[in-house]
Image: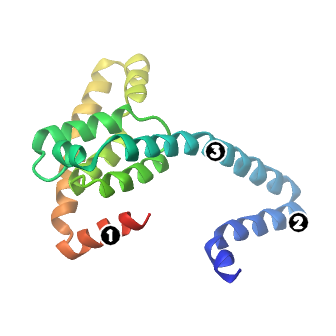
Amino acid sequence: MMKQLTRYRFVFLTLLILLFLNLFFQELGAKALSITSFSLVEMLQVIPPVFIFLGLLDVWVPRDVMVKYMGEGSGLKGILLAIFIGSAAAGPLYGAFPIAAVFMKKGVKLSNVLIFIGAWSTTKIPMFLFEMASMGRTFALTRLLVNLPGIIFIALILTKLLSKEEEKALYEKAQTL
């Protein structure tokens, strides 16, 4: 019981704060409850498809295929595949992290995992099309052409900054998820 309380302490704390706000500051409490429920509904719409995708990825794509295309020694094709998968993905950034964990379980190189997360957060195809339509081709292409090398550069720097022990600990943590 105590383990469950500790595990969900932030949920309970949020509920307590919402209760407090609704009791003493009704207008603010109603607004906070509205925002919280909107975020919860949005998250419940995103999480199930992500976990369905994870299950399919885990079952349908063998580890050796992931290692071949995105693992150590995958080179440019691993980088391009990480960018494509991240750019084609839909949903908020928190949907990328479970997929990144499965990638790590399957032996994807850490820099490619980081590139995937960077592409998910920055280079989504729908966002690019929206920018083309609303801000113009020059802006959209400039932003994309600045972001892509930036994502790759940051991923490579981060992997160089991590020690082998830290990287190994990340992969071990991913195995337990």
Q: Amino acid at mark 1?
A: Glu
Point out residue 125 in the picture as x, y percentages from the top left corner. Answer: 37, 27
The front one of 137 and 50 is: 50
Indicate left or right for 165 with 28 as reference.
left
Sort mark 3 into few (<14), some (14-19) or many (20+) by Cα contacts within 10 Å.
Answer: few
The residues bearing labels 1 and 2 have C-alpha atoms spaced at a distance of 46 Å
Whichever of labels 3 and 1 marks the residue nearer the N terminus, that label is: 3
Q: Which residue appears farthest toward the bottom when viewing the image?
A: 2
Label for residue 44? 3
Point out residue 17 in the picture as x, y percentages from the top left corner. Answer: 76, 67
Q: Amino acid at mark 3?
A: Leu
Tag 1's secondary structure?
Answer: helix
Q: Is residue 128 above or below residue 48?
A: above
Q: Are marks 3 and 1 in contact (CB under 8 Å)?
A: no
Q: Is residue 149 visible?
A: no
Report which residue position mark 2 lands on: 24
Sort mark 2 into few (<14), some (14-19) or many (20+) by Cα contacts within 10 Å.
Answer: few
Which residue is depicted at the point 78% across and 62% down? 18
Point out residue 44 in the picture as x, y percentages from the top left corner. Answer: 64, 45
Label for residue 172? 1
Q: Amino acid at mark 2?
A: Phe
Indicate left or right for 20 with 13 as reference.
right
Sort mark 1 into few (<14), some (14-19) or many (20+) by Cα contacts within 10 Å.
Answer: few
Tag 2's secondary structure?
Answer: helix
Where is the N terminus found, in terms of image quarters? bottom right
The residues bearing labels 3 and 1 have C-alpha atoms spaced at a distance of 28 Å
Q: Are marks 3 and 2 in contact (CB under 8 Å)?
A: no
Whichever of labels 3 and 2 marks the residue nearer the N terminus, that label is: 2
Q: Is residue 148 visible?
A: yes
